[in-house]
Amino acid sequence: MAGSASPCPALSRLRSAAAAPGASPAPPAPSPARLPSEAPLGPDGTAGSGHRRDSREHMVQESHQDRELGTCPRESPSLHSRFTILTITREPRSKHGAKDGAVGTSQGCTSASSGAATTSPTITTALFEPDRDGQTPQVVVLVGAPGMGKTTMVRRVMVEWGEGTLHTQFDFVFCIDCKAMVLPMEASVADLVSQCCPGLRVPAGKILDDQKKILFIFDGFEALGFSLVQPEAELSSDPREVKPLELTMMSLLKKTVLPESSLLITMRPAALGSLRQCLKGECYVEILGFSAARRKEYFHRYFENPNKADMAFRFARSNEILYSLCVIPVMSWTTCTVLEQELCGKKNLIDCSKTTTGMILFYLSQILKHRDKDNPQVLQKFLLQLCSLAAEGIWKHKVVFEEKEIKDCGLDQPSLLPFFLNESIPREGEDHDSVYAFTHLHLQEFFAAMFYVLEDDEEMASSLGKLDKNVNKLLESYNKSRKDLNVTVRFLFGLVSQKSIEYMDKTIGCRISPRAREELLEWLQGRHRGLSQPGKVLKVSEMDTFHFLFEMNEKSFAQSALGHFTDLDLRDTKLTLYDQMALSFCIQHWAGLGCVTFQGCSFQRQDPEAELDASVPCSGIPGAGGHPSALVVRRREELPCPIHLLCRALRHRDSALQVLRLQWCQLSESCCAELAALLAEHPGLARLELADSSLGDSGVRLLCEGLRAPGCSLRILRLRYSRITSACCEDLAAVLSTNTCLEELDLSFSEGLRDAGVELLCEGLQHCASPLQTLRLGSCRLSGTCCQALAVQLLQGPRLTCLDLSDNELGAQGVLQLCQQLRHPACPLQMLGLSTDGFSPALLQELDALRALQPVLKIGNLLEHDVPQAGAMARLPCHRGLLPGGRKALPSVRRTSLL
C-alpha cells in the first residue's frame, strides 16, 4: 500500500508484481548485472571490460522477460516493442517541498516547486542529466503513484545500460528490488552486491573500489518498512563492514559509505516524507503518465493490426472518463487487454462502463466467462476467498502472500489463480517457497471492496477466516487515519451502484448486499455533518466525496447524499480532469448548492502535455511524423477552458447557485469568457469573487460582456488582485451604466488602475443604472488627483454608502476634498476607507471634526479584515507579498506627514 510500511520483519518481504505500463505488468524484476564466473579482473585489479560486457548482455536478456496480466504464461513482446514514452517532470535538487503524500497523480512536483519543475517528453535521459547549473545529481528519487510506471522505467534504465545506448557513465548497475529480494537482517554493501549477483566470482569489494562508476537502484523503497531515523554514529563508512540492514541502507542513503556512487530510488508519493529528511542534493523526478499523443501511440504499439488499434483507440477516446483515466499507464494497458479480447473474432466493440469499477467488472467477466460454467459455486467460492485474502492484505499493508496462505485459503486452483495473482518462483539457491501478489495493487483494492459488499451463505462465510465484514468499521478507519483505504472505499461505491449490482448478478453470478448501499449513504451524510462547525452552513470540503459519488454514477444517490448540504468549499487542491468530471457530475445533481468556493486551486486543462508532445513524432509507428509548430499553437487554442466543466455544470437547469468564489486559482482569459456566459445565463448568481492576478484587462473585458447581458443579476463583483489597468475601465464604466443590479464593485489591489482609471469609472457613475452602494479601491496607487472626481460622485452619483480608499497616498489636499463633500447633510456615505497611519495632527483633527458632524460615518483602514492568506499570496506572481517594484501587496503603514 502506498505510504504504508510494516515493521522491521518486512525486510524480507517479497515483491508484488506491479504493472509495467510501458509494456505490460512486470513479473518480479531480475537481479541485474549478474556477473559470469569466468570474467577476469582488469590490469588495475578491478573488474575488466569483458566482465562489464558480459554483465550488460545478461542485463538485456533478463530485463526483457515479461508476462501478461490475466493471461496464461506465454512469450511476451519485447520491452522495446511495447515501451511508450512517459511524461515526467524533473525538480531541481534539494527543493522538493511538497507535503507528505502530495506528490503523485493529483498533486505533483510542479506545484510543489513553484514552477521550477520542468516537463520532459523523455523517460530516462532526464534522470542523470546535469541541471541548469551544470551539476549532475548523484541521487535521483523517482516518484509515482501505483501503476504509473516506476518499475518499467527501472527496467528501461537497465536495458539501455545493458545495451550500451545510455547511462554509459556507469560500469556496474545493481538493482535491489525491495519487494522481491529476500534480504538478510545483517549485511554489508558488498554482501548486497553479491546477493544481487549470486554468480559473482570477482570479489565485490574490487567492483566497489571505483565508486563513480556504480549505480545502485532501490525499486519500491517503501516496502522495506524500517525506520529511517538511525544514529549517525552507527552508520558505516566501509562497504565491507557488516551491519544491521537498516544501518547499511541508511549509510548508502546518507553517503557515509561509497559517497561517490549514484542512487536511483523509486517510491510512492505517500512514503516520500521520511526519505526526504535523509537525502542531500537529490533530484526528484515524477512520472505524470501518458500524454494524449502517447496514449494513442501506446494503443498502436499494443495492437499488431493497425485497424484494430484505430478501432480500440476511437472506442477509448469516445468514452470521456475512460480516456482520461488512460493517462495512467496501467489503465491504458487494462483497456487494451480488455478490448483485444473483445475484438477477437469480432468486427466492432460493445459499450463499456464509464467508471473504473465498471471497467474492472467488464474485465473480470471476460476472463471468467468460459471458466467453471458447469460448477458456478466453485467460482463463487474462489472469488469470496480471493476477496477475503485481498481485504486481509489491505488491512495489514500486505501485498505479498506466501504459498501456505494461498493453500489455506483454498486458492491453489491452477485454472483460476494465474488470472488474479502473479507467482514469484524462487531462484536457484534461494531458500523459500513461491510467493504470490495481485497483478496490481488496484486489483487487490477492488477485491477487498468486493469482500465487504458480497452476499455469502453461512457455509462460505465460515471459510473466510476471522476478518469482520463490517463496512462501517472500514469507513470509520478511513475517516480517522487510514487514508490509504481511499481506492478501496471508492470501489465500494462503484460496486453498490444499481448497474454494478445487476452486472455482477447477471455476468459473474455474485450478489451485492443491498444493506451496503444504505450504509454508504448514511456514512456519507453523517461524515460531512461532523466536519461542519456547529451553527455554520453545512458544506462539503473533501474532494474524495465527489470521487465516491462519481464512481457510483447514480443521479438519485448523489441527490440523496448531497441534498442536506448547501456549500462546496475546496482549498489548495490541484484539480485534474478526473476531479473536474467528478465535480461536474455531482454539481449537476446538487439541487441545494448555493455557494461554491475554490481557493488556491488549479484547474488542469484536458491535456496539459498536448502542447509539448504535439511536435514529437510517434516513433516506431508507420506513417507518423513530426507536426509543424502551427499545430502546437492550434492545439493549444482548441483546448477547452480549464473551468469549462465547472461552468457547464453550474449552468444546469435546477441550479440554486448564488455565490461563486474563485480565489487565486490561476484563471486565464478564456476562463473569463466561460464566466461571462455563466453570468448571462444564470439569473440566480448574485455574488462573484475573483482574486487572481492573471486576469488582466482582456479577461475583465470579457467578463464585462456577461455583466452587460440582460440575464445578469449579479449584485456583488469582487476583482481583487486582478492586475487591471485604466485600459479596461471604460468597459467597467459601461457596466455601471447598463447593469441594474450591481450593488458592490471591489477592485482592490489593482495597482495598474491609478487615477486615470478611477476618473473613467466616475464617468460611468454619472450615468449609473446600478444601485451601487459599495466601491472598493484600496491599494490601487491612487493619488489626490482622483479625489475631486470621487468627491463629486458622493453627492451626484449613486447613493454610495461605502468607499474604500485604504492604502493609497491621497495627500492632504485629496483627503480634504473628500471631507468637504462628506460634510454635506445629503451625503449617504457611512464608511470611508483611509489609512490614517502617518496623518498629521491637523488632518486627524479634521477627521475627528467630520466624525462629530456625521456620527454614522466610520473612517479607518477597511483592507485589514479581508486580505489573502499567506498560502494564497505565495501563489501570486509577486514574491512574498511584494508586487513588482518592491511595493507591498498588503496594506502598508505610512509614517510621512501629510500636513
Image (cartoon, rainbow, N blue to C red):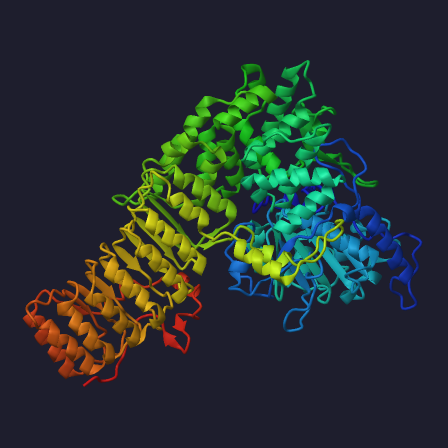
Residue 457 position (above or below residue 723): above
Residue 377 position (above or below residue 550): above
Residue 174 position (above or below residue 312): below
Residue 725 is left or right of residue 822, and the answer is right
Instruction: Give how far across and how far down residue 769 sits, in percent.
Output: 20, 59
Residue drawn at x 29%, y 76% as measured from the top left: 756
Residue 278 visible in the current orientation: no
Residue 585 visible in the current orientation: yes
The residue most toward the top is 374
Within the image, what quadrant is residue 708 found in? Answer: bottom left
Residue 224 position (above or below residue 867): above
Which quarter of the image is occupied by the C terminus?
bottom left
Instruction: Give how far across and how far down residue 735 sits, in percent.
Output: 28, 61
Residue 662 is left or right of residue 299, and the answer is left
Instruction: Give how far across and how far down residue 665 sits, in percent.
Output: 42, 57
Between residues 854 and 228, which one lies in front from this camera angle?
A: 854
Within the image, what quadrant is residue 363 found in? Answer: top right
Residue drawn at x 56%, y 47% as measured from the top left: 3
Residue drawn at x 58%, y 24% as measured from the top left: 465
Residue 338 is left or right of residue 427, and the answer is left
Between residues 261 and 346, which one lies in front from this camera angle?
A: 346
